[in-house]
Amino acid sequence: MASAQKEKAETVKHGQDLVKLHSSTAHDWQTEKRIHKDFYDDGTLTFFWRAHTITALVVFSAILVYVALFEEPSLDRDYNAKRGLFALILAFLLFGIINTPDGPFIRPHPVFWRLILCISIVYELCLVFLLFQDVHSARLIMKHFDSSLGQPLPEKDYGGNCLIYDANHTDPLHNFWDKMDGFVPTHFIGWWLKTLVLRDWWLCTVLSIMFEVLEYTLEHQLPNFSECWWDHWIMDALVCNGLGIYLGMKTLRYLSMKPYHWRGMWNIPTYRGMLKRLAQQFTPHSWIDYDWKPTSSLKRWLSMLGVISMFLLAELNTFYLKFVLWIPPEHYLCLSRLVVFLFMGAAAMRETFQFLDDPNCKKFGRQSWVIVSIIITELLIVLKFDWNTVTKPLPKPVAIFWLIGALGLFIWTIVKFYIFKDVKHDIPNISNPSEQSKNSENNNLMNNLTLDRPLLRQRQMRTKD
């Protein structure tokens, strides 16, 4: 009797193992996406890929022992408070990069992307703390980062004199040279990097044009949104944004077509090859092209509208936060925020694309969750600290323009997804009976525990065809 129960338990366990094996090999989204890529990795592990948790704990404890027992204590309370907060943040970051799960990227090292996630969490916590202050206290807090902060910003109106050639001036091109400041190259580089993050020409173009429209819309609130027409559409949209997007698309094409062959450092016989492999550590491990397919379904369309809205809101927050907290555009705090947002956005877009594209991905990504919460918190800070500026009513022509645009977008959505296309395709196994039969066949295939893997793959390929 006991032997029969044992044999039955082993049979059940064997069946469960087969189901797990078949389920894990039935759909691998990442492998499917790079099936046409030239990719190879020998899987060699080196010293630098190990966790080193004990080593990190020993070093961290040694630093604390030095501070507690050997360092000369300071009687400056303000200095001690700042130093203690800084050490607190470093301790959290150390814990995070060791214990948080890996992100979607593994180059240059998974630890880097864990660090980005932890930095974004710290930034969100700082924003939440700032949200509970009044505007005067928040501006005083900025003085702890730089004593020169906390002063009202000088207003710069880029749209004063819009003559490209001013014959009545000693320098006829003085208006043009006045606009050619240090933000022009950063604007160009920024859109090149944004294109690498979004990996789609139409999405970048829509965002570029929409932000220029938003600048027109909100120039009555922020003076630096007021620009000449040629500054908006020629220097920004066409030159900086357009050339940045063009260079980004060329870079994407190169990254998509190049081979990705990885060997361990110590498997390379020459020092030159080792140095080349070291430099390649800062390039992508593999490449996945983003095909957002915004009009493929109603759900996908609404999701893409949400992605576009969040991206534009993050861009607007950059200008409004500087305005309400009195931080000059060229300050290192602004640049640091943009750099962190770039890396956060890269990981978040990768997670968001998989969430929309992978049918087996049912959970919103960690970095995506954090960056959305950051954007919302920044918006709430702006609304709380300068409600009067943010709620200035739109000029009547601008309000009519946005009303017509919103109405047109709503009508187009109804026509596209409800009149000329049945929205039932958003619900699986209803609109297409043949798909339903294929899914049923796959389910029966997975329930058959006696199927071997070659037959499983053969049946899957036939159903896909």
Image (tube, helix red, strand yellow):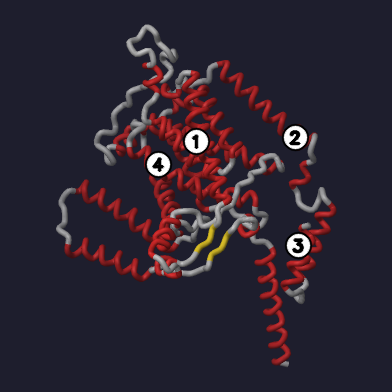
Q: Amino acid at mark 2?
A: Lys
Mark 3 = which residue?
Answer: 461
> Which label lies toward us, 2 or 3?
3
Assign a secondary structure to mark 1.
helix
Q: Are marks 4 and 2 in contact (CB under 8 Å)?
A: no
Could you tell me how far apart the alpha carbons at marks 1 and 3 are, in whole angstroms? 41 Å
Tell me: residue 133, above or below residue 278. above
Residue 384 in view (yes/no)? no
Q: Residue at x 45, y 34 (%)?
A: 188
Q: Amino acid at mark 4?
A: Arg
Check disc 4 and report its element: helix, strand or loop. helix
Left or right, residue 184 beside residue 301: left
Is residue 325 found left or right of 259 in the rendered image? Answer: left
Disc nearer the start of the sequence (3/4)? 4
Question: For the residue carrying disc 3, how many other residues have a C-alpha within 10 Å: few (<14), some (14-19), or many (20+)?
Answer: few
Q: Which residue is mark 2?
A: 416
The residue tagged 4 is 337
Which residue is located at x 52 percent, y 48 percent?
A: 348
* Label pair 3/4, CB-CB below 8 angstroms: no
Q: CA separation, marks 4 and 2?
A: 39 Å
At which x and y percent is residue 283? 47, 53
Q: Name the residue rendered at 41%, 43% in the picture.
A: 339
- The type of residue carrying mark 3 is Met
